[in-house]
Amino acid sequence: MTAAVPAVMTTAARDLAPHELRILVTVDDERGFSAAAKALGLTQSAVSHSVRGMERKVGAVLFERGRRGATPTAAGTVAAAHARRVLRLLDNLASEARGAERGTVTGPLRIAAFRSAALFLLPPVLKRLTARYPGIEPEVRIVRELGAGTAGEVAEGRADVGIATIGATSPVPAGLVGDVLMEEPYSLVHPVGHPAPRSLPLVDWHENCGSYTRRWWAGQEWIPEATILTEDDGAVLSLVSRGLGMAIMPALALNEAPHGIEVTDLGPERPTRSVGYVTTAEMAHSVSVRALIRELRAARP
């Protein structure tokens, strides 16, 4: 059931308070007033009353109420994303103010990264970052680079920085800022010593960035349709190492490849994948995000 659209308030009373933003985000996360109330230590009626008040202030219905809980409307989805980002800025305001007074940088740094970036790009970067700024507390979450991917986590306020696949065919999403850090070449991966690796069946995974290599891929008559489709690049490498097929994979995914794998260069016309960072315009000015970006740039090959 969708409530009637409330009238917009026209005074300063329409400003949302931080405690209201926290309730909004928690209802969105929990998909229900009762669950949100439990998470926040409030009564359900208090949460419901607060949401109704926010809807009056905003002038839009934020959640559809039903037997299955609270489902965000289009307005609610946008509002929750902004609420997360505002709350993060308030947290950052306090930590950076304290840091400026004490000459330190402290607090969490939330990073969303796709699997191979989290496993092989970030560890040495974070080691240098935390050695220089011991007060920074990195929180890394692996996010599949499908759909909105890591950039979506940043846009929704769930991450401060996303390590993303970006480039000419996948630009930085509107409303975010970012840059390319490295170009990963793709290579042919096959069992060691196989006399005709291109004759093997293709092993692939959902996240392999066909959109960035589609034109090249379409022009290669020797590449068949995938016989085996897996959930991640690690499974692809495991299958190839056991002689079950070949794969075409980007460089980051080939770090610490298992025994039994041979990597063959695809030549000067090989495809590449652009890996970079994305963040919000507001968080791009924060000390911790700027420090992370410096370390990421320093790590570029």
Image (tube, rainbow, N blue to C red):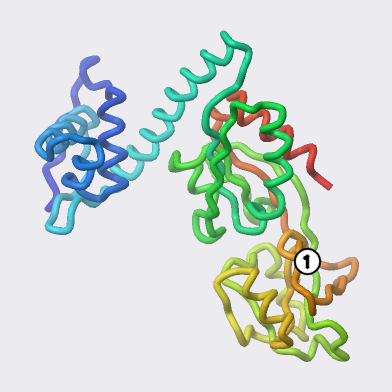
Q: How far across and how far down the image is residue 207, in percent?
A: 59, 66
Seen in the image, is 46 located left or right of residue 155?
A: left
Percent coordinates x, y for residue 40 in the rendering = 24, 36
Residue at the image point whose x is 56% and y is 42% from the top: 111
| Residue 165 seen by the camera | no
Apparent side of residue 15 relative to residue 183 in the rendered image (left or right) = left
Residue 250 sits above or below residue 280 on the image: below
Q: Residue at x 71, y 54 (%)?
A: 120
Residue at image position (79%, 83%) is 191
Residue at (29% x, 45% y) in the render? 28
Looking at the image, can residue 3 be seen? yes
Horizontal side of 256 relative to 32 (left or right) equals right
- Say which residue label 1 marks: 186
Q: Amino acid at mark 1?
A: Tyr
Quarter of the rendering containing residue 300: top right
- How dense is the environment of label 1, judged by Cα within 10 Å: few (below 14), some, or many (20 and up)? many
User: Residue 52, percent across and down?
Assistant: 15, 35
Relative to 225, does residue 102 appear above or below in the rendering?
Answer: above
